[in-house]
Amino acid sequence: MADLNSIAKQIHNLSPGPVEITLQDGSQAIYQISKAEFFQQEFQAEGTRENDEPRYRFVSSEDNESILIGRKEPDESTWTMVGRIQEIGAVETE
């Protein structure tokens, strides 16, 4: 069996809790992960972003090489692609 995606493993290990995510375009935000799970190699998580209403979904790419983020507004029925995760870090809580 191939290795699990390292970014997905970090998200899984830090959940439930806040994580700082940097996308490939360089943008950064803190997300509160509420649920994270693996289905063999495939990864899926859900969460919210600080001071933001939409729900976010984190999923493996088809080849399991990347973790992608989708966003869904409360009044929408479909997910919109936000980007690809470049880096992830723990958020220190007080």
Image (spheres, rainbow, N blue to C red):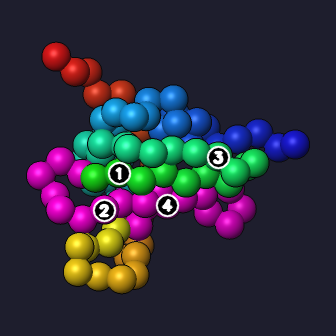
Residue range highlighted in magenta: 49-70
**Residue 68 badge:** 4
**Going from the N terminus, do you reach mark 4 or mark 2 first?**
2
**Residue 59 badge:** none
- Which of the two discs, 4 and 3, sits closer to the camera? 3
Residue labelled with disc 2: 55
* SS state under label 4: strand
Alpha-carbon distance for marks 1 and 2? Answer: 6 Å
- Is the residue under label 3 in contact with that under label 2 (CB below 8 Å)? no
**Residue 38 badge:** 3
Q: Which amino acid does the dot numbered 4 rest on? A: Leu
Q: Residue furthest right?
A: 1
58 magenta-colored: yes
Residue at the image position 48 percent from the left and 51 percent from the top? 45
- Is the residue under label 3 in contact with that under label 4 (CB below 8 Å)? no
- Is the residue under label 2 in contact with that under label 1 (CB below 8 Å)? yes
Quarter of the figure with residue 27: bottom left
Q: Is residue 9 visible to us here?
A: yes
69 relative to 60 in the view: left or right: left
* SS state under label 2: strand
Residue at the image position 23 percent from the left and 80 percent from the top? 75
**Going from the N terminus, do you reach mark 1 or mark 2 first?**
1
Counting other residues with Cα less than 10 Å from the Cα at mark 4, is it few (<14), some (14-19), or many (20 or more)? some
**Picture layout, residue 46 above or below residue 11:** below
- Is the residue under label 2 in contact with that under label 4 (CB below 8 Å)? no
Residue at the image position 34 percent from the left and 33 percent from the top? 17
Residue 70 location in percent, x, y? 41, 67
